[in-house]
Image: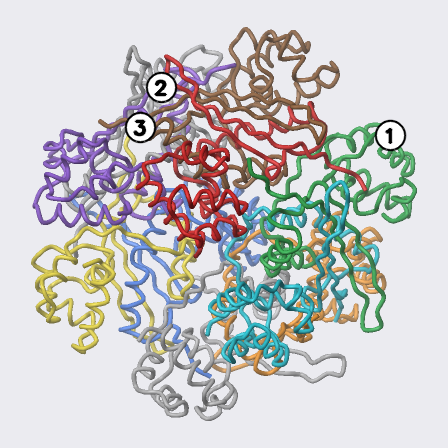
Chain colours: A cyan, B green, C red, D brown, E purple, G yellow, H blue, J orange
């Protein structure tokens, strides 16, 4: 079972179950962003949560196995076109140098890891219009000399 | 005075002053991410904070005027190469579809605005290595039918 | 049912029905540009108009469901080649900076939303040759400081 | 005098004059979008309005001559990055096929000219937030057989 | 029937018929360049010649219908690789600015339409080697001010 | 003297002289398209016409020498943006396969040379709007087996 | 039968026959480089060698017909990645300007034809390691004035 | 002295000297293709020929030093536009797979080195038009297992 | 059997066997990096190890034959997106010029062969986190003059 | 002083000093690869080695300051053209998937850090031709769930 077939199988089962990502991830015991990314084929799961997810959605062991496989993370649009995703790309373009300045000032020369990394997405209710709050949390990795 | 000359002038004055972005932005009364982005030419300032910044750094009115000019936001690398900025691009590539799923579930069909938007960058101290915490906060804009 | 299959199903049914986009959208109670974009998979419909459209064209509930799904808006040509679409791209290239100047003067620093947005396409009869009139109407979103 | 030098000269004179594009174009007797595009080097002016513009802004004949030169319309970003301009590019990507459907239905097989073309940009006041209204008006050009 | 299937059907029938493009277009009553472009899916035919073509090649009404559909003109190579087609691309690159100068001198500021346009391809016999003569004839469209 | 400096020098002298490309090329004894392309740096001239051109425009021998140098034909836009030049690119995209079909039928497998090649640009007066007529004439080069 | 199917059919038959390109081309009476390029779909054969090739490999007339069809020469990698092919691309990049200088000096302003062209590939035995010798032979085509 | 300044200095001195690449390379004792490539900044010379070249053209030691520097081989056009150079690119595209087949058959799995490599360019006189003969000679490098 | 089918067949058999690349390559008598690259279709095997591999994994002769075929080394992402592979691309971008300086100083003008080349990947245990050690070993190929 | 001016200053001083990178880095007390990368503007130095380097090469404090500045790591060729650097790019393309397989097997799902990273370049003497040995050593970073 390829990651692509896995995603289609999970999406169909999720729809039938009537469960949302939040509900599923609570049952599995993982964050909803991470769990969703694994179901979309962009991260791998450990055996336990993979089996648990299959149990929740009534899927068999081949899906669990596909969830545990190490993914080759590929995306096909160098500049994403979907407006929601493009806005994030735009934020990187507009604020990239700024982030570099601020991180440099606070931490020294280095980067924020995208591997030792987590992300949360929350809804902030607001009478002027609700707001999306995305929190990225990555380990600072200093450049070392040798 | 072009935005480019403005940035060079501010960077030189900042260095001489010995002040960091945090310190400057506190004196000006704006967030450090926003203020830095304006100094790098990616946002415009209102007259008052523009003048205040020039006062703090001992710069004349042409710099204030340049800070108030509406910028044309251009970046020259479609895929950024600096490792710190690339990691953010990678996050968009790896998690873009995931964010779309989660936002869709929590808010419905729409996007997170990159205009009615703010960002904070914080340092989370951690014995296993400090962590960079980036918080993006953008208004949810629902797609409307007409 | 994917969005692609949905579009093919609708196009075939529309052809059989002999109805045009204007006629269909009047029956459904939505603007013809918006309705067409939803049928082409670039917008989602609310349940009521989705069901109504299926009723008008004699399609079953899976089509309605596909119409309600949140689309991933992808296009595959960075520079469009069809002459009609290219001319619009050319207008953006030729007049982009001009629009920025005029909007800046009339509204201040900000953008026209492409989400809180509507579009109409009209025919202006003219003895020297009829004219296409495209009207875009988007909310002005000012850049905010924070 | 190149078009680039011409634009810089005009922008500086405009700033000194305190006049906006609307005010200048009224004095010159042309639409503000067209006049601005000529000042930015993307269209040429006839001798009379070119001279008039120079009179209004106190510029000499070399500027008028540069305004009358036929421009080579070049833009350097295949995908524009400025958010205001990108949103227009996005509209072309999201609605291009839709516009093709509607124009085909209303006019037959052909295009909207980007040459026999005009554009207006208006402000629609709205308590929920003012709106930008862009109206494009281009001659329909039918494909002919031969 | 898609345009692609239409082209394959026509090419097979043409081969069986033993007729060339010249012969077919004479029977249909259209120029050979235009007719060929329609058969390759890059132009649409009016009902009469579409039916006539199907009669000539012994094809049924679905082919005629496909010929009448308005095509979405797409090509997949930004720089064409076939030597015959590349040479034309090269001519545009080498002589583009020159054509702009000469057209500007003879007609004023404007373009040659690619829509109100026809093309002929002839063979000029020559003892030193026959020559291909391509004649393009497009309406001059002047830029207008507004 | 580089080709670029040569072009600027010639353009300035041409403007002062009040002569058009047609008039100049008649005096020099070459076609206006070819002569213009040489002045724009895309072809080289033989010594005699190079000297003649300099005589006509009152330029010195360094310009003649630059005109005789073999140019490196470079263009910087893979897809041209100027509307006049883009329309020619579009013609290649829309009609490239068609031209290949017709040339194949009339001449056999081979190409139209872009080197043993000439081009004329004429004005066809027409009450419905004058027309640009571009005639390309290139030697047919058959593919040979070996 | 498409060119792609033709190539697959020939490759399978060649493998079964145990014959190499050299042996096949000797039997057919053509050079091995040219014959191979035709079998890979990048050149067309005349009827006689096409039939002869089919006879040698025991293939039927549809293959011969496909070999005679005029190919549309397309390649899908702008920069080739296979090391053997990339090295040739690299040679063009490193020595292109040099070849232009030397050809200019020996022949005048013009090009080496890639159509009236042949190529041989030989093995030069050498105790320090055998060497590949590629000889390209193309007609010089001088630029002409008109 | 950069490689670019070196090339300009050599080109000017070569022109003054009236010597061609053939004549210069004979005096220096190297092949004309290699010598030219070094003068264009795409190869380095050993001290002796570098000094010799400077002696022949009356240039000082800084030029010799620049000739000995190891070049960073960069070219700026991924697809070359000059017709002479493009034809070579086209040959790689059309015949790349063919060369791979023939080299594979004659030598086994491996490549032709572009480093342990030489090239000659000759003129073959021919009453039907002289021919350019380019001979590339590169060491065969077999892929090894380990 | 294509290389792609070969890879899928091997991957399935490897999974069933429970053997890792290290274990398989030891049984076959080749390095694990080289063997893996051959199984992924990026290198060819000699008959003996190809047969041995098939014996180890219980595969038939068509797989062995496919392993012996000379691959066309193609990759489809100019800039790789998988984080593990991107980091290597980044190393080439950040350190490329540095490697050129050091190799130039130690060896003279030339390159490291990617053909007469081997690579090892080792695990260095480290209490602060294990480390990946990649060792590349390629023959130095000096540029030669001719 | 920009990083670019810094590099030029250091390269000139290094040349005058007659010292190589190995010798300089020994005096400074850092590895030659790291030190060279800092001098080329791709890494920053701590104050002590920056001052030490300036002392060794007789440079003033502005150079030391520039060496300590945090670099923005940019490279301008998406696919490098210099043969030495391209070969490394090729290794990433050919062996990227293989490295992913082997690292996955030895370490689990994760990457080799390019930040917590060092590299050595050595010369392995060999009678059949010396060999370049590049050793990369990067911390393994496992993907974590959250």
What's the chain of the residue with tag 1? B
Mark 1, Cα crowd under 10 Å, few <14 / some 14-19 / many 20+, is: few
Identify which residue, D52 or B13, lies in the foreground: D52
| Vertical relation: C98 (above or below) C89 | above
Residue with the mark numbered 3: D143
Which mark is nearer the camera, 2 or 1? 2
Q: Which residue is mark 1?
A: B60
x%, y% of residue D93? 50, 41
Nearer to the camera, B130 or B75: B130
The quarter holding residue G111 reads top left
Residue E140, label in figure: 2
Chain ID, mark 3: D
Residues flagged by tags 2 and 1 on a common chain: no
> For the residues carrying marks 2 and 3, which lies nearer the camera in this image?
3
Which image quarter holds the C terminus of chain J?
bottom right
Query: Residue at position x 50%, y 35% from top?
Result: C30
């Amino acid at each position: 079972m390829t990651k692509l077939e896995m995603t289609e199988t999970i999406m169909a089962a999720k729809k039938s179950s009537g469960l949302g990502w939040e509900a599923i991830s609570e049952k599995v015991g993982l964050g909803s962003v991470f769990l969703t990314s694994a179901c979309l084929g962009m991260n791998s799961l450990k055996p336990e949560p993979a089996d648990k997810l299959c149990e929740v959605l009534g899927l068999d062991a081949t899906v669990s196995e596909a969830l545990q496989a190490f993914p080759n993370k590929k995306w096909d649009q160098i500049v994403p076109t979907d407006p929601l995703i493009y806005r994030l790309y735009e934020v990187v373009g507009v604020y990239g140098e700024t982030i570099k300045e601020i991180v440099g000032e606070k931490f020294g020369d280095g980067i924020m890891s995208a591997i030792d990394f987590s992300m949360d997405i929350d809804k902030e209710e607001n009478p002027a219009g609700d707001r999306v709050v995305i929190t990225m949390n990555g380990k600072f990795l200093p450049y070392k000399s040798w």
